[in-house]
Amino acid sequence: MKILQAVLLAFAVSGSTGAAAATFTVTSTADTGAGSLRQAILDANANVGADVIVFAIPATGVQTLSPASALPEITDPVTIDATTQPGYAGTPLIELDGAGAGQGVAGLDVSAGSTTVRGLAIGRFSLYGIRLTGRGANVVEACYIGVDPTGTLDRGDGLAGISITGGSSGNRVGGTTAAQRNVLAGSAVGMIVEGTGKSNVIEGNYVGTDASGTFSISSSLGISVDSADVTIGGSEPGAGNLVSGHSGDGIHFGGNNGRIEGNRIGTDASGTAALPNTANGLSIAGASGVHVTGNLISGNGGGGVNLTGSNCALTNNFIGTDASGHFPLGNGGPGIAIERDSSDNTVGDADPGIANIIAFNGGDGVILSTSPSSPPGKGNSIRRNVIYANRGLGINLVGLDFAPGPAPNDPLDADDGPNGMQNYPLITTITYGAVTTTVSGLFGSAPNATFDLDFYGNAACAFRPHDYLQGESYMGSTTVLTDGAGAAAFTVELPAAALPGTPISATATSADGSTSEFSQRIVFTVSPASGPASGGTPLALSGTNFLPGLAVTVGGANAVGVTVETAELASAASPALTPGTVADIVAINPDGTRGTLAEGWLADFQDVPEANPFHASVTTLVTNGVSAGCGAGNFCVNAALTRAQVAVLLLKARNGLCFVPAPATGTVFADVASTDFAAAWIEALAAAGITDGCGGGNYCPGTPVSRAQMAVFLLKSEHGPGYVPPQCVGIFDDVPCPSLFADWIEELFAEGITGGCGADPALYCPSDPTTRGQAAALLSTTFALE
């Protein structure tokens, strides 16, 4: 009997058919025969039980296996562990190269379930690197899929690196340790999860980047989900994925009841530099019950989050900042876009402890929009977040009759659109105390209804003079009940102190959860923004809640003939002011509601009348606080711009009004003493990596800036000090390609910032000095000043 048991045990361990698990060893790079991976899979399939395939190919370095046809489908549970190859030290030594495997082929096709694939580099298969179908509970970890074994070169698979389909559930791709991390890049899609499967987890992977998480390896889309209960990331340390560097969305999520947590989307692995997904960081497409929490979603070319769906929650995310939550790494578009009929979603919550930080984005902080083909969404709650320094509005409700700027309040809040175009409160007085802040104001909306009002403090210095109020710090809340006329007055003592003069904004949220825009000054814009210093220019003031008896001052002088046309439009005539004066416009209603449009009006410079070709650009630059005149009511529009002057203009245009350079040391450039004009700005420009001077340790502050040099200054200020423009192709007749500045000049043209130097579009005039008028046009366009 003992002899028979020994024979049976030996028979099982040798790899023959039986019920006991066995270990099969790959010893050859051959495609078929003993010791090949193909034969090991065949043997494991034939042996019922959880077998193991290990590697012991007798050679050093990466060993490439090149299947000439599809490998056998894995139909019985097995662990394929390429980390067993001698010499393995954290990066794959076994590569599956599918270039010769034919069409319609996946690298590994797994239907068995309970299978682990570990430590392989898999690339160049026509369909997928790995396909998981049927039974689930599979694990894929420590693999490079779509990249070579160094993790730096594109070896993309045709459709996706990994596909989970066919009802496969409970799979895990990646893990919480660096040793379990997969690198998925180069393929058309990094990973696809679709079908009826549930409870699939994707954690700890680098998707779209090289193995260092620093560089993009081209893919169209990072992770695509059309399946329920998928988790991307997690709350454990190391569970978050890096999803960056794609030409489309980072994550496209179409499955209900999913969770997206702790990921970095659009940045490098450190979270301190952008590695953009060209489209949106995250798109939630028609899904419900998705929870997005604790993610860093920044640096993307489009928006941070694009949402069409219902009952989704966005909490504790950093959207537009770096990983610290303090420094700018904005998305190109809005932080969050909630579109079409999306309803009952929450951004933040009544609990400020789960607020999102939404800042530094190129569009609105949060925008809600609709379309003619669907009813507008309602019940979208946007409460107690940190929203500031976004290029557009903090919260923007956009109806079908879109107009830029805040939506004006309307009587009884009868208009319709996203969130019912909920009216916002108007603040009339603020009393600043040592411990609390008391705010009074007026609110009008639907009659006999209850609303929650949330109050926010904002930085005293706006990024641009005309910026609308957002909500940088939550200060407290109150509840109001409107009367039969839809009106409510409020006075609330907020349990937070604020420095005197701190702007305070507020939102209103209705009982169904629909949140308004932030409250604003009652005057939004003025048109035109400049006119003759002699006065008399007709002004059109747009805003909200204008009342008969409205008073308007411009630079402290009373405007003439103030007439309230509608609650949103008033007219007046400009007073006489000194040429070159930039003035605040103040509008005050009889009920105490008021607003100031800072630096809203420019009395024309004597040398820049309306007929001057640079009039509009000069007006824009000056009313944005970037530049002033040169004295005696003139702008010196035709004077050459010096290198000292350009340092001031670039940093003000790039960093906004609040930027103050550190005191000059006088030690950075030999020809710039600490007491020289613009010395602090020049040293700050150098510290930002935008200039290293003119050579020989000098800056040449009094030297005019050539048009060629201006191209470099602008593009480095816009894109960052490490920016390298595309190679030139030869656009201008007077800019040889290649030459020192050709790449920069042609990129400036490609971005629509310049069109040349005159009537002949083939000329750029690279050696000519940049005039102050030209600089106004270039800066206004580069930094999208309005």
Image: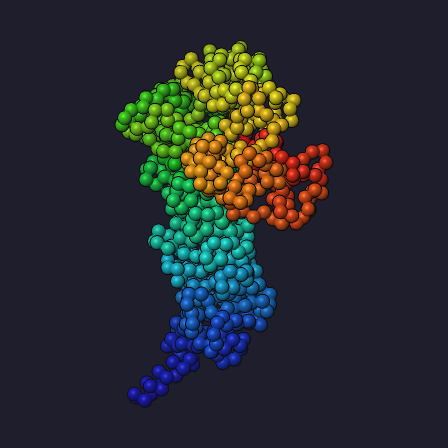
Quadrant hosting residue 477: top left
Which of the two residues, 35 or 751, is positioned nearer the viewer here? 751
Q: Is residue 353 above or below residue 34?
A: above
Residue at screen point 66% across, 49% down: 738
Q: Is residue 650 above or below residue 32?
A: above
Which of the two residues, 744 or 600, is positioned nearer the viewer here? 744
Residue 198 in view (yes/no):
no
Residue 764 in view (yes/no):
yes
Which of the two residues, 172 or 739, is positioned nearer the viewer here? 739
Q: Position of residue 596 (x, y in %)?
A: 45, 21
Side of 783 where 452 appears, left or right: left
Residue at screen point 31% across, 25% down: 437
Question: Which image quadrant: the N terminus?
Answer: bottom left
Residue at screen point 49% across, 31% down: 677
Side of 433 where 773 appears, left or right: right
Residue at screen point 40% across, 76% down: 23
Q: Position of residue 611 (x, y in %)?
A: 65, 22
Q: How is the image coloured?
A: rainbow
Q: Position of residue 723 (x, y in %)?
A: 54, 46
